Amino acid sequence: MSRVGAVDCGTNSIRLLIADRADGGLTDVHREMRIVRLGQGVDATGQFAPEALARTEAALADYADLMREHGVEKVRMVATSATRDAGNRDRFFDMTARVLGAVVPGAVAEVITGSEEAALSFRGAVGELDSAAAPFVVVDLGGGSTEVVLGHTAEVTASHSADIGCVRLTERCLHSDPPTATEVAAARDVARQGLADAFRAVPVERARTWVGVAGTMTTLAALAHRMDAYDSDAIHLSRVPFGRLLEVCEELIAMPRSRRAALGPMHEGRVDVIGGGAIIVEELADALARRAGIDELVVSEHDILDGIALSIA
C-alpha cells in the first residue's frame, strides 16, 4: 500500500486528494476543494493575473502542509485548460515546483492535453458503475473546457476537449445581473458551437448512460434534489431526470447573483459562473436526448482527481 497525493488545478478550482492506494483501488484519507479562479481573465488576455497566481499559491501551500502531515509518499499535480492557454505559465510552474518540492523532492506540476484530461476524468468517474450500463458518456464540465468522453469501464473509445466552460462562457457573454435575454442567447450559440466539434468527434449516440462530473454538475444535482446543504455522499451516483435538471438550469440562468448566493448547496466561488455552466448543461442534455435517447443525468463525485491518484505508479 502507498499513500499518494493528487492535485487537480483547473480554471476555477484547485483540489486535493490524499488516498491510500492498494489492490488497484483508493481509500480516501483527505479530500478538499478551493475556488481560486486561476483562469481569471485568461480567455481575454492570454495571461495569468498576478492575484490569481497568488490565490493559487496560497491554496497549494496549504495542500503541501496537509500532504506532509499525512505522510504522502508520491504526488502528482496536473493543470488543465487555463494553464494550456496562458502565455506566462512559466511563473505558475516555478511556483508549483517550489511548493511541491517541499513535499516530494523534484515534484512538479504538469500540463496535460485535453485527451489526457478526458481519459483521467473517465477513469475516475466510472470506476464504481455497473458495466451493464455501458457505454458511458462522461462529461467533465470545468471552468475553461468541457471534456466529452465515450467508453466502457476500462476503455475510452473516443474523446474531445471543447474550449468552453463555465468561467470562459460567463466572461465572454454573461455580463449583466441577471443576464439579459440577448446575452443568454449569445451564450447558447457559443456553447452550441463549442460542443459541435465534440459531438462530431465522439459518437454519443452509442451511449446508454450520461455521467456528469465536477462542480457545476454536482451543484446542479444538489439543487435538483432540493438539498438545504451540500451533501457529497447523497449526491454521489444520484440520478436527475432531465425535466428536473432543465428546470433547475432555467431558474439559475434567470436568477440574480444575490439569490444564487443564498442557495444552501451553492459554493460562493460558483455563484457568478453557475449560470454559464447551466447553459452548457442544457445544450448537452438536448443533444444527448436527441442523439442517444438518454433522459437522465448520473452525477459522480469521483472524477479527474481520482483518475490522477489511480495513475500514480
Image: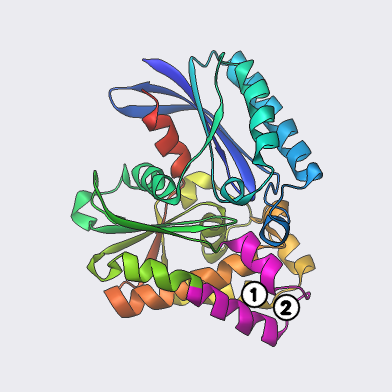
| Label 2 neighbour load within 10 Å: few <14, some 14-19, many 20+ | many
Magenta span contains residue 130: no
Query: Disc 1 to disc 2, how far (Cα)?
Result: 7 Å
Q: Going by the image, does 162 lie left or right of 34?
A: left
Q: Going by the image, does 82 lie left or right of 258?
A: left
Q: Which residue is mark 2?
A: 179
Residues under numbered marks 1 and 2 in contact, where contact means CB atoms less than 8 Å apart: yes
Q: Which residues are magenta?
A: 165-193
Q: Amino acid type of disc 2?
A: Pro
Q: Which residue is mark 1?
A: 253
Q: Residue at x 72, y 53 (%)?
A: 40
Q: Position of residue 293 (x, y in %)?
A: 28, 76
Q: Residue at x 49, y 70 (%)?
A: 194
Query: What secondary structure predominates along the stretch shown in magenta?
Result: helix
Which of these two is toward me, 30 or 292?
292
Q: Does residue 304 appear anywhere in the picture?
A: yes
Q: Secondary structure at mark 1?
A: helix
Q: Amino acid type of disc 1?
A: Ile
Q: Residue at x 67, y 23 (%)?
A: 99
Marks 1 and 2, the one that precedes in the sequence: 2
Q: Secondary structure at mark 2?
A: loop
